[in-house]
Image (cartoon, grey):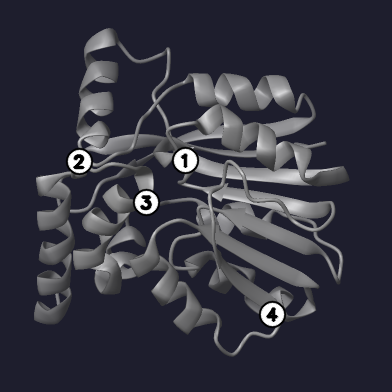
Amino acid sequence: MNPARFVADARVMLAMLRGMPGGPDTQSRLQAFYAPQAQAYDAFRERLLRGRAELIASLDLADGAHVVELGAGTGRNLEHFGPRLAKLGRVDLIDLCPPLLDQARRRAAHLPNVRVIAADACTWRPEGPVDCVILSYSLTMIPEWRRALVNAISMLASGGVLAVADFTVSPAQNALARRFWKAWFGHDGVHLDHAHVEALCACLPRHRFGEYRAPLPYLGLKARYYLFTGQR
């Protein structure tokens, strides 16, 4: 491995080892956790957050579509759209974390159809109905995730699509494995709960769902993640 890449990875892993710090609110906790690792965030999580490219490639979006990403982080998912991005009417990237939003603004600086907005996924509202809402490894990081989910679905136009990728635990795992993974991810503010999947499937009965396993960088362990697309 390139030495510079290893040093960058080590910076991210050190922040993860320290865990999500305490703080008076979600924004301050995100600020403290991500500020030391923001510049190296994408390179490391490219090998951690699997399925994002496949999820976005599966979206059937018309030219001029309005897309919202809640918990958009650095805006890395923009690149997964490829040439289709220029044909979208507007993309709104919503996040609460200032260091990650700074990276997103740099990424989107030359994209006239992309807006980067500092706001809460539970309360932010677009001016009108949108064609697609994406929650990419963000639902597990939102304390009031049910509010965020209701908000996401309510902003969809009729026929609009909610697309979700995230980590999970499964009833198919034994209790010890579920406890291990909840504790492992919970240390960094990622709260695994199969209730996320149950709520998604119940709210949007017209959906596609798949569950997969992917290796964690440097560890050899495989974590479960899922891809979900549901139509309103």
Q: Foreground mark, 1 or 2?
A: 2
Task: Check disc 1 and report its element: helix, strand or loop.
Answer: strand
Q: Amino acid at mark 1?
A: Asp
Which residue is label 3 attached to?
27
Q: Position of residue 137 (x, y in %)?
A: 45, 46
- The CA distance from mark 4 to mark 1 is 25 Å
Q: Position of residue 223 (x, y in %)?
A: 32, 36
Upstream in the sequence, badge 4 or badge 2? 2
Numbered label attached to residue 83? 4
Numbered label attached to residue 166? 1
Q: Position of residue 173 (x, y in %)?
A: 34, 15
User: Quadrant where the C terminus lies?
Assistant: top right
Q: Foreground mark, 3 or 4?
A: 3
Upstream in the sequence, badge 3 or badge 4? 3
- Residue at 61 percent of width and 22 percent of height: 199
Question: Is residue 113 left or right of 213 when viewed as pictured?
Answer: right
Q: Amino acid at mark 2?
A: Gly
Q: Amino acid at mark 3?
A: Gln
- The CA distance from mark 1 to mark 2 is 23 Å
Question: Is 37 placed above or below 143 here?
Answer: below
Question: Is residue 31 left or right of 107 when viewed as pictured?
Answer: left
Q: Amino acid at mark 4?
A: Pro
The quadrant in which residue 10 appears is: bottom left
Work out which residue is located at the far top of the displayed protein and give it. Answer: 175
Upstream in the sequence, badge 1 or badge 2? 2
- The CA distance from mark 4 to mark 2 is 41 Å
Which residue is label 2 attached to?
22
- Residue at 80 percent of width and 45 percent of height: 156
